[in-house]
């Protein structure tokens, strides 16, 4: 399948699922699909710098990475429409709500690390995209915690995608500079 067709089919599915709840990017009025497309562009750019990178697989993961966590989509539905490997990748990228909040990120990273590096790349790209100016309602502790999670992601997934690792490292520095200035 051509990559444009993959993108169009996947973003339509994801946009429909996220729009069921009128989901927006936290702290904005922007539709959630903007975040998904930003993660996808990080993946498409990273593909140019990586050997043995399955762009079709990674692009599906990028666009679907929050569907299990934030929408009515199910594992079986994703497996039926996009394949079981994609469903497993999306599942690994989904935090386990049954765990205490303090354990969710490490649990997800452990599951991600067992899967192909395209899954790692999506986690890196997701955090790159999310390390923008934090929502106004976040206090200093929440901002610092979010930065520390980004550092944890970067360290844990080291060796997954050099390009995205460098991007995330730069975003962490920018984020710290923003915190220091405000």
Image (cartoon, rainbow, N blue to C red):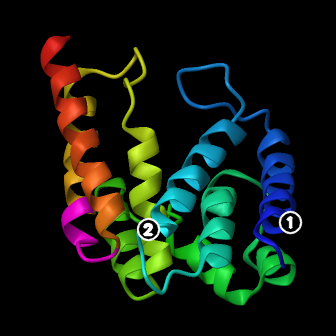
Which residue is tagged 1? 5
Residue closest to the far left = 180
Q: Secondary structure at mark 2?
A: helix
Point out the image quarter for the N terminus. bottom right
x, y percent for residue 149: 26, 51
The quarter of the picture where residue 147 lies is: top left
Looking at the image, residue 5 sits to the left or right of residue 178; the answer is right
| Mark 2 vs mark 1, CA separation in Å | 21 Å
Taking the spot 69% from the left edge, 68% from the top edge, the residue there is 60
Q: Is residue 144 on the magenta stretch?
A: no
Q: Up-down: is 104 above or below 58?
A: above
Taking the spot 17% from the left edge, 37% from the top edge, the residue there is 173
Looking at the image, residue 151 sits to the left or right of residue 74; the answer is left
Point out the image quarter for the C terminus. top left
Residue closest to the far top = 182
Instruction: Please rate how many residues cluster around mark 1, counting C-alpha atoms within 10 Å: few if below 14, some from 14 to 19, many from 20.
Output: few
Taking the spot 49% from the left edge, 64% from the top edge, the residue there is 122
Comparing marks 2 and 1, which lies closer to the viewer?
Answer: 1
Q: Secondary structure at mark 1?
A: helix
Which residue is tagged 2? 121
Pick the front one: 115 or 121: 121
Q: Up-down: is 53 above or below 59?
A: below
x, y percent for residue 35: 60, 41
Q: Up-down: is 181 above or below 68?
A: above
The quarter of the picture where residue 56 lies is: bottom right
- What segment carries the magenta color? 154-160
Pick the front one: 59 or 123: 59
The answer to which of marks 2 and 1 sits earlier in the sequence is 1
Taking the spot 46% from the left edge, 62% from the top edge, the residue there is 46
Q: Up-down: is 22 above or below 102?
A: above
Looking at the image, residue 72 sits to the left or right of residue 119; the answer is right
x, y percent for residue 58: 59, 72
């Amino acid at each position: 399948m051509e990559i444009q067709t993959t993108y169009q089919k996947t973003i339509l599915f994801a946009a429909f699922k996220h729009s069921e709840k009128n989901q927006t990017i936290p702290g904005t009025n922007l539709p959630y699909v903007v975040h998904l497309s930003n993660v996808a562009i990080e993946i498409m750019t990273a593909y140019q710098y990586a050997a043995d990178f399955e762009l079709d697989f990674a692009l599906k993961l990028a666009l679907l990475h929050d569907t299990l966590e934030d929408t009515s989509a199910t594992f079986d539905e994703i497996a039926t429409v996009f394949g079981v490997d994609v469903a497993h990748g999306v599942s690994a990228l989904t935090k386990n709500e049954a765990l205490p909040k303090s354990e969710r990120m490490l649990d997800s990273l452990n599951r991600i690390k067992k899967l192909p590096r395209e899954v790692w790349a999506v986690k890196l790209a997701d955090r790159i995209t999310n390390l923008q100016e934090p929502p106004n309602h976040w206090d200093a502790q929440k901002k610092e915690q979010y930065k520390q999670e980004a550092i944890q992601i970067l360290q844990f997934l080291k060796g997954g995608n050099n390009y995205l690792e460098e991007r995330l490292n730069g975003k962490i520095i920018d984020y710290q500079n923003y915190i220091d200035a405000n």
